[in-house]
């Protein structure tokens, strides 16, 4: 396909440009909207989600009926129930409770010539969120963008169109009640996949694209987007058990990092262990994992330790299983662990277990990931666990935001300079 | 041209990948290099530039001889003299004096479960800088990237190849003396323009691209780059003289903003003035400007005020003259000024002159530019004037860095989490 011939029709382009212009206009109002109005909209949307529970479930049933050929995992992501609906509502209320990032003075100083300079948080502008089946992202992403003063265009999975529309109605209700533009949160109303292509070309209308989904979505967005992207790649997270680790702590952390929930991006996918700890630490860890129903894929040394271990291939070191599977490799020390993680990991979240301060600091400094931990589970990779409140995901990119992307990370800044007639000599 | 068929030969691609791999390896060393080593390299490079003055001037003479068909303006940018060489050397020494941003703890807190979380500055990784004729950018950008712990690949204008190579030798000398990898600062050794295309495709090897140059360069980079870009677009800067401005202050600021230096990105290109101030303020300002040799292009009301004013066309509102020309328009108040600037400006730097606090705050909040000023000249748009030390340019993008891009803006962060065995419940 030529880069100059768009793969979408004029109709779709026209429709998307309409959303873009409406979003830009809404963003201008939102940028200076008072915190109270935004919080009022969030709380009213939460209430509307609770009272609209029946309508949301009916819409979701329609999506599920139309999506007969979905895999069980995708159906599970798509399906809403009372708990998930309540989680959306209380999520919006939590966002309302956060401090408003907009207008915060990040830094302030006075120059010798009397100029007062302030670096002040302002919204990013218009955010485009592209996500897959989970309809709750509609509420989460819509709410967080609103809190940060951004207009948002939400492009959910085509299989969740009815569910997302029902949730979108509740958000619109909240905006109306608070006197904010309804176009602050817009849903792409078509299941046509070409809408994504059109969105990614709208650099005049959208300031940042946030893709949330599997590798193929992220790669498509990276390849096609003419708009800056805050990417949330997979989490190929590691635990490295150093020879100087406490055995019981290592067992507890590995089990939690792998098995607490296997389907989240902070779940560990690979275990590295120092050779001298193979007998003392790895043996009981393998017992724990296999005992809990985890498949263990190991290198030759690991296989020799326990005959329940199956062989790992080169591909395993790069694989995010999101399942009860773990790859295990013996390394000769912290430097080999660091090299392995930087080569095979996804720069998401990696942990060292050790009582050796020097090895720990070396690992924390040299592992090139958004989150590095010592003596703690990788499953803490979560905005809520960091005390940041809700998040739209964990950024594995390097620019703008790294790690949990919350309301603060959805802002940028401007310099406000106050003078008394100064001119430059 | 198809997006899948690269417009560059395998040779160029191979050569550029070699630079990329060497840069990645150097970046890993630089990331944890002590501040003293980096500062030693910077100071030694400065000394080498002073002692190498003769060689640099000879290389520059060669470039100038080969560049016979360059415009006078481009020749001026390309030409080096003793002052410009000294400015490069002292610029590197200034960078050496800055605090090392790497390792700075931006924020630190402890969670109720005892996890200690720190947000720590780390280098971006590998930076690609693409610039036009000025050879001094080789020293400035190379030095700043080094300070921030980044490896850098510099792609200067093909017409400055000899000059940049001579400067690059001095930087390499500094790196060698300090025991840092010479590949920390690499120059693209070919004048082949295809090298830029190859660079922009190297997402595995380069973490951020910084283009410095005219509109066509920036647009090409935006269009082609598969790597995140910190863009430095043009500066279509405005001064808005409100009806409540002090006349003398308004005259001083407009003259300085326009005429102090016309060729820098912070120079004002458009003057907006409130209708009620046309007689009282604009008339003397027009006298000042015309008297100083500035061409004034005005709307009909402005033309009627002074017969030395020539008509402005619609295109003038969007034009960065970088010359002794200014466009002038009458507006009906601060809201119209804000709307004009947000529509026609380049989100760079804009100033309001007024004694009216309410109008000022409205302008500062609503003008969507990297730098907004009250009662001060737009020519303060400069990292040095902000007290940030050297800068690589003024970012007009919204993500990561906005306004002056100095050493701090050339870093990112990671979260370092220290625990004592915590697992997630």
Image (spheres, coloured by chain):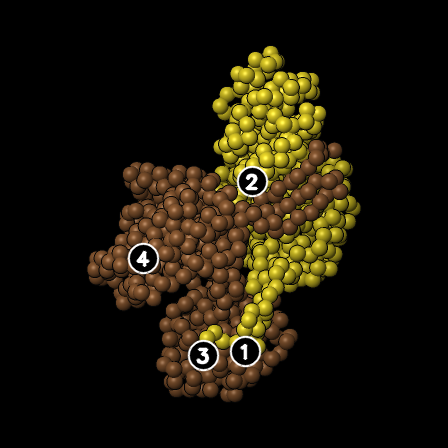
Chain colours: A brown, B yellow
Q: Residue at x 49, y 23 (%)?
A: B314
**Quadrant of the image for the C terminus of chain A?**
top right
Q: How many residues crowd around disc 1 within 10 Å: few (fewer than 14), some, or many (20 or more)?
A: some
Contact, mark 3 vs mark 4 (Cβ under 8 Å): no
**Which one is in front in this view, the residue at disc 1 or the one at disc 2?**
2
Instruction: State which chain disc 4 sits on.
Output: A
For label 1, the residue is: B421
Report the Cα–Cα distance between label 1 and label 4.
43 Å
Q: Is residue A349 left or right of residue B82?
A: left
Residue B369, located in which quarter of the rendered image? Answer: top right
Occupied quadrant, residue B279: top right
Helix, strand or loop at label 1? It is: strand
Query: Residue B338, how many percent across, how many down?
Result: 53, 33
- The image position of residue B385, as x and y in percent, is 70, 41
Pinpoint the chain carrying mark 2.
Answer: B
Query: For numbered disc 2, what is the local secondary structure?
Result: helix
Is disc 2 in the same subunit as disc 3?
no
**Where is mark 3, residue-wise?**
A255
Q: Is residue B350 above or below residue A287?
A: above
* Residue A182 versus residue B184 in the image, above or below: above
Q: Residue at x 29, y 38 (%)?
A: A11
The residue to which callout 2 is attached is B365
Residue sitting nearer the eye, B167 or B363: B363
| Nearest to N terminus: mark 1 or mark 2 | 2
Q: What is the distance, in whole Å, between disc 3 and disc 1 at their CAs?
A: 12 Å
């Amino acid at each position: 396909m030529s880069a100059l011939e768009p793969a979408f029709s004029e109709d779709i382009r026209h429709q998307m440009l309409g959303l873009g212009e409406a979003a830009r206009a809404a963003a201008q109002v939102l940028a200076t909207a008072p915190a109270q109005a935004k919080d009022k909209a969030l709380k009213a949307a939460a209430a509307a989600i609770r009272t609209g529970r029946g309508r949301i479930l009916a819409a979701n049933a329609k999506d599920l009926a139309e999506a007969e050929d979905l895999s069980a995992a995708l159906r599970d992501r798509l399906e809403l129930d009372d708990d998930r609906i309540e989680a959306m509502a209380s999520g919006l209320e939590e966002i309302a409770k956060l401090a408003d990032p907009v207008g915060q003075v990040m830094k302030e100083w006075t120059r010798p010539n009397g100029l007062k300079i302030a670096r002040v948080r302002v919204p990013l502008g218009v955010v485009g969120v592209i996500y897959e089946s989970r309809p709750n992202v509609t509420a989460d992403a819509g709410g967080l963008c609103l809190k940060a003063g951004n207009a948002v265009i939400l492009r959910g999975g085509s299989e969740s169109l009815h569910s997302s529309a029902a949730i979108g109605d509740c958000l619109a209700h909240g905006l109306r009640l608070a006197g904010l533009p309804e176009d602050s949160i817009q849903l792409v109303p078509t299941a046509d996949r070409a809408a994504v292509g059109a969105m990614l070309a709208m650099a005049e209308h959208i300031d940042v694209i946030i893709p949330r989904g599997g590798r193929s979505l992220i790669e498509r967005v990276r390849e096609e987007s003419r708009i800056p992207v805050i990417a949330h790649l997979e989490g190929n997270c590691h635990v490295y058990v150093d020879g100087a680790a406490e055995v019981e702590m290592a067992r507890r952390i590995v089990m939690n990092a792998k098995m607490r929930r296997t389907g989240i991006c902070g779940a560990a996918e690979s275990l590295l262990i120092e050779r001298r700890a193979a007998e003392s630490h790895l043996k009981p860890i393998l017992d724990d994992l296999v005992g809990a129903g985890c498949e263990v894929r190991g290198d030759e040394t690991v296989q020799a330790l326990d005959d329940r271990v199956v062989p790992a291939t080169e591909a395993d070191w790069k694989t995010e299983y999101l399942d009860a599977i773990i790859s295990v490799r013996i390394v000769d020390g912290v430097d080999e662990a660091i090299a392995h993680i930087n080569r095979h990991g996804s720069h998401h979240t990696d942990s060292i277990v050790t009582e050796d301060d020097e090895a720990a600091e070396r690992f924390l400094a040299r592992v090139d990931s958004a989150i590095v931990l010592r003596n703690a589970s990788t499953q803490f990779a979560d905005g809520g666990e960091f005390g940041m409140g809700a998040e739209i995901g964990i950024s594995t990119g390097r620019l703008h935001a790294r790690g949990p992307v919350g309301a603060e990370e959805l802002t940028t800044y401007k310099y406000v300079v106050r003078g008394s007639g100064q001119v430059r000599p």
